[in-house]
Image (spheres, helix red, strand yellow):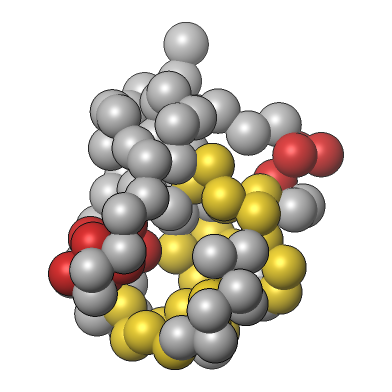
């Protein structure tokens, strides 16, 4: 059995999230999750465990390269989805179907 998902680490960096449906652009700080950043911007997004284990916050990933930290997505599913409660961008920008 895998251990818990890693939320925030000392080597994490800030990155941008572009919201494809609304056109919004948000900066995700190195010490914040995508989910926290979206909520702080007033967006309501579904979530439950907030630890990468339930799949409730699954969001379509339209662009960018994600660093998947969840324990839910298969390799195939990870190509077009992201768990916004724990996962981050490897670099630059992620484009989400929001």
Q: Residue furthest right?
A: 76
Q: x%, y% of residue 36?
A: 23, 60
Residue at the image point whose x is 28% and y is 49% from the top: 7
For image coordinates 75% across by 39% down, the residue present is 77
Q: Quadrant of residue 34?
A: bottom left
Q: Position of residue 40 (x, y in %)?
A: 18, 69
Can the viewer see residue 94?
Answer: no
Query: Is 95 placed left or right of 42 in the picture?
Result: right
In this rendering, the answer to whether 58 lies above or below 40 is above
- Say which residue appears at 31% left-offset and 64% top-offset: 43
Eyeballing the image, is 62 above or below 5?
below
Given residues 69 and 95, the one toward you in this image is 95
Q: Is residue 1 visible?
A: yes
Relative side of 64 to 45, left or right: right
- Quadrant of residue 64 in the image? bottom right
Tell me residue 25's x, y (percent): 44, 88
Q: Quadrant of residue 27?
A: bottom left
Quarter of the image with the C terminus is bottom right
The total number of labels drawn is 0
Q: Is residue 44 left or right of residue 58?
A: left
Q: Please indicate whether residue 80 sits to the left or right of residue 87 in the image.
A: right
Q: Residue furthest top?
A: 1
Residue located 65% across and 70% down the image: 65
The percent coordinates of residue 50 (x first, y second) are: 28, 37
């Amino acid at each position: 059995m895998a251990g818990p998902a890693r939320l925030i680490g000392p080597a994490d960096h800030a990155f941008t999230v572009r919201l494809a449906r609304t056109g919004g652009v948000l900066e995700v700080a190195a010490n914040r999750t995508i989910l926290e950043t979206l909520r702080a911007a007033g967006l309501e997004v579904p979530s439950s465990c907030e630890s990468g284990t339930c799949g409730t916050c699954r969001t379509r990933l339209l662009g960018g390269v994600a660093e998947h930290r969840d324990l839910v997505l298969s390799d195939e599913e990870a190509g077009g989805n992201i768990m916004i409660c724990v996962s981050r961008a490897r670099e630059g920008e992620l484009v989400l179907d929001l």
